[in-house]
Amino acid sequence: MKRIWVAIGVLAVVIALCIVELTATVNITDELADTITTAQTSLKKGDEENARALCRQAFDDWQTHYDTMATFIAHSKLEQIDQSVTVTQTYLERGQLDDFMAEADRTRTQLERLKDTELPSLSNIL
């Protein structure tokens, strides 16, 4: 009987950790995608300085959360997003606005895919 209770306790811990991981991933990816979208909107309105500030904020936020996400997500997925976030900021700093818009779209798509692959669904489990 004691083994059953230990198994139930371990199962509860695993489920709790999965919920924490999922919540963190969804929150981080949504926050970054929103910041990038706001930067794109600012740039379309002609506010390049605000777009730069938002892009720097997205970069800093990504660097802050990278280590946390690397504990439970494959590094190859995160590395692609890391490169894209860096390139996005570089394009904006150099004034390559069309390239910035395209790379920002790519970054948001990568963030959405990352979130989708972490959601518990039948296709992700199988």
Image (spheres, rainbow, N blue to C red):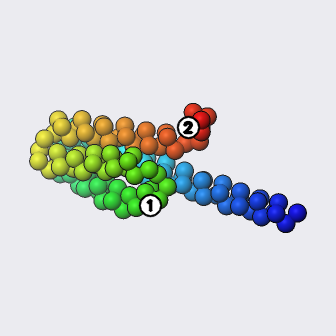
Q: Which secondary structure, mark 1?
A: helix
| 1 or 2: tag closer to the N-terminus | 1
Inspect the image, locate mark 2, and give the three-letter code of the amino acid beneath it: Asn
Query: Seen in the image, is 125 located left or right of residue 5?
Result: left
Q: Can residue 91 be seen in this view?
A: yes
Looking at the image, the residue that sits furthest to the bottom is: 2
Query: Seen in the image, is 36 located left or right of residue 45?
Result: right
Residue mark closest to the camera, 1 vs 2: 2
Inspect the image, locate mark 1, and give the three-letter code of the amino acid beneath it: Thr
Judge by depth and name the residue closer to the eye, 113 or 5. 5
- Report the residue marked by disc 2: 124
Quarter of the image with the C terminus in it:
top right
- Residue 70 location, x and y as percent? 43, 57
- Report the residue marked by disc 1: 68
Query: Seen in the image, is 96 located left or right of residue 118?
Result: left
Residue located 39% across and 43% down the image:
111
Q: Which secondary structure, mark 2?
A: helix
- Residue 44 location, x and y as percent? 22, 37
